Image (cartoon, rainbow, N blue to C red):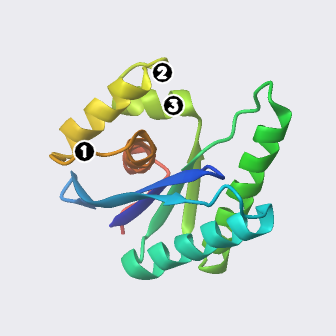
Amino acid sequence: MIILGIDPSLVSTGWGVISISDSMVNYIDSGVIKTVSKDSLVLKLGNISLMIEKLITRFNPFHVAMEEVFINKNYSSSVTLIQARGAIMSVIGRYNIDFSEYAPNKIKKAIVGAGKAEKHQVQQMVKLLMHIKKAISKDESDALATAYTASVNQQIKII
């Protein structure tokens, strides 16, 4: 079973692909979708949608998992994050792929064992659990941690 994990952002959306077989989690690939700062919001959202669609057609995931939004004090950045998530979710819906979302503290608890873990701890555990030797960004490790959380969540039934 292939799971695509997504750490949404208008600037740098992290993505990570894992496979589950015989209760083993295997790292397949990961990366970051970067947008150009001078581009319009519509162009940025279109680019994110296009890249997510390319990932879906390339990896054909059984399930997509995404980090939930938390509303912070900066209202405008929360709104743009929600818009990025909407662009991503519309692609997932078009392909009718099984979908789940997880709060950041649930992801941290699944990967590190503590809901208040630091980003570098998540990054270290992702690399350890998935036997990743190369350097990965925090956006990638967050996306992979989200995919991992989906793999251990009971909502996903392996058929």
For the residue carrying disc 1, how many other residues have a C-alpha within 10 Å: few (<14), some (14-19), or many (20+)?
few
Residues at discs 2 and 3 in contact (Cβ within 8 Å):
yes
Q: Quadrant of residue 159?
A: bottom left
- Residue 3 to residue 110: above or below: below
Q: Residue at x 61, y 51 (%)?
A: 11
Q: Indicate the amino acid at tag 3.
A: Lys
- x and y percentages locating residue 80 in the rendered image: 77, 49
Task: Describe residue 100's horizontal placement relative to residue 3 as left or right.
Answer: right
Where the N terminus falls, by quadrant?
A: bottom left
**Badge 3 density bin: few <14, some 14–19, many ≥20, Cα 10 Å:** some
Residue corresponding to mark 1: 135
85 displayed left or right of 1: right
Residue 6 visible in the displayed image: no
> What residue sits 43% from the left and 20% below the top?
117
Amino acid type at mark 1: Ala
The image quadrant that residue 22 belongs to is bottom left
Residue 115: numbered disc: 2
Depth check, mark 1 against mark 2: the one in front is 1
Task: Answer yes or no: is residue 147 visible.
Answer: yes
Q: Are marks 1 and 3 in contact (CB under 8 Å)?
A: no
Task: Please report the residue visible at 42 percent of the width from the left and 71 percent of the height from the top.
Answer: 61
> To which residue does mark 3 refer?
106
